[in-house]
Amino acid sequence: MRARVVWTILRREWMETLRNRLLLSTILIPPVLLTVAPLILAGAVGDRALPAELATQVLRQKPEWGAFSPGELAGAFAVQQFLVFFLLMPAYIPLSIATFSIIGEKQARSLEPVLAAPIRTVELLAGKAIAALVPGVLAGWVTYVAFVALASVVYGPALFGVVTDGSWLAGVFLLGPAVGLSSVVAGVIVSARVNDPRVAQQIGGVVIVPIVGLVMVQATGTLLVGPVGYVLMSLGVLLISLVGLRVGVRLFDREAILTRWR
Amino acid sequence: MTSPSTEAPIALRAVGLGRRFGDRWAVRGIDLDVRRGEVLGLLGPNGAGKTTTVRLLTALIEPTEGTASVDGFDVRNRPEDVRSRVGILTETPGLYDKLSATANLDFFGRLYGLDAAARAERIERYLRVFGLWERRDDVTGAFSKGMKQKLAIARALLHDPSVVFLDEPTAALDPEAAFIVREAIETLRRAGRTIVLATHNLDEADRLCDRIAFVRAGLVMVASPAELRGSLGQRSLVIRLASGPSPATLEALRGLDGVGAVDAVDGVLRLDAPDPESIAPAAVRALVTAGGAIVEVRIDRTSLEQIYFDVMGVRPGADGIEAVG
């Protein structure tokens, strides 16, 4: 694989993304909302305490929060729910970019001239995958850093400690990119089969279902995933993504694109 | 039309080339040599296998049997070398509509490994050649079909390929856009480019090609337009008179050496002759002597369209094209 060719593909993908207002809005709006919303929620919780039963359940899973005041415990629990939302960005953004990119090329029939150039399909796929993955992962990371900075300024050291513990770091910096990769793979596989980016996003959105499940178990307080849990989930998602990648590479075969993609 | 020398090196060769999709052979048994500087037309109806042939020859898809080479590089073993030596105009321009003309060409220049200076020089050269320089910063989504097609041709030439493949370059274009694109191809022909032109436009093939390969799931025949007319076509001398000819006039014409059948319809005489140029003076003298008032004299050749129907074994019937024989 030649880095020069991959960079050429990647560069053009980003040039097109920057000129696609619809796509750009789907990339830029969620990070802003996800930075502000948790802080507003934590503020809304104020000094209100959690119901006693839930507080006991939370402290059983997070004994390190035992020193918090009732108000801090409620704020920490509320903010903790938002960790999974930082996983939605690396899931949703790459999916949008990958589906727009591949289906856009299908509709414009612009892949044939590219494939007629001395380029390997793996280089083409790598360029497209990286171009889709990087903005999503970076958006997740940048948003997280902004969120941590704002949280520490507004709510002080207690909440800062919550959003920078091992769970958050493993979730944002390990599971996030792994989810992003699975999202790109889903985008490639689905886009090879359908001709409408919106349909592809809806089908590819299946990737988000496990994350929504994670939200629900966290919200009920029945399972607050720790750092080890996030590392294990990252490895699992990575493994699934690599298997999916093999399928994606096969679907992205030069002859299949030329003779079967319509 | 200046044909390339038979001594010119072979740029493109196919030997027993064939491709099967499932149980169906799209093309089979293609044997072909194209010399440097030659313009070869691939002529055939929709679905005849022209695009498949182009894709095989450009190493876009692998042959099921046989082989092909460009500048000696085999499409099976050295596909990347083949692709770096060919330029292709695909059936649709396939441009990036949100990017400018310059950005489109720059992307492909990078893919073909041209350095920044070469890209800048060639992008300017080809945009000027095709009259797009003033629109170089406009997004191609705002271009007309003809402009898009010209830009796609410029893209195919950017890396200075050994062979240029043009797949249906004027299909789906309005007459004005088609004219612009044909002029562009004519420019390439005059510049001595080796071109393979896949088309179902008979006039286009007749005007632009040194040789024409009739394709129908394989090669049916390869010959120059002149050879096709010589071997398959009929030629005749057509003389239009101010009034209908007298029986004596007709008798005089039929007695001339080298003249076959003589038909007269509404004052127009058609003299079948293998060499109409040589009998024209004698025919005109005979008519003047017989008192005929000549309005027009011309040599009529069988159209490529008629030859196409003969070669392909089809004839235009009342309800469309039907196969014969």
Image (cartoon, helix red, strand yellow):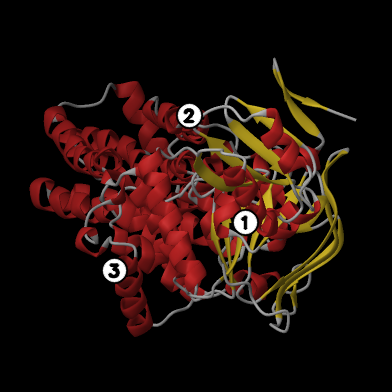
Marks 1 and 2, how far apart in space?
95 Å
SS of the residue under disc 3? helix
What chain does badge 3 belong to?
B
Task: Return the residue at label 1.
Answer: B281
Q: Nearer the viewer, mark 2 or mark 3?
A: 3
Marks 3 and 1, how far apart in space?
49 Å
Q: Nearer the viewer, mark 1 or mark 2?
A: 1
Residue under disc 1 on the same chain as residue under disc 2: no
List x then y, in percent, for residue B192. Answer: 53, 75
Task: Return the residue at label 3.
Answer: B128
List x then y, in percent, for residue A80. Answer: 31, 39
Rendered position, B71 above or below B27: below
**Mark 3: amino acid:** Arg
Taking B120 as reference, is B57 left or right? right
Tell me which residue sits at (34%, 54%) in the image: A135
Marks 2 and 3, how far apart in space?
59 Å
Rendered position, A226 above or below B8: above
Residue under disc 2 on the same chain as residue under disc 3: no
Q: How many marks on residues?
A: 3
**Mark 2: amino acid:** Gly
The answer to whether residue A66 of the structure is visible from this angle is no
Circles 3, 1 touching at the beta carbon (< 8 Å): no
SS of the residue under disc 1? helix
What chain does badge 1 belong to?
B
Residue under disc 3 on the same chain as residue under disc 1: yes
Of all residues shown, which one is farthest toward the top? B319
Tell me which residue sits at (60%, 45%) in the image: B289
> Between disc 3 and disc 1, whose residue precedes?
3
**Mark 1: amino acid:** Pro
Q: Residue A213 shows which numbered tag?
A: 2
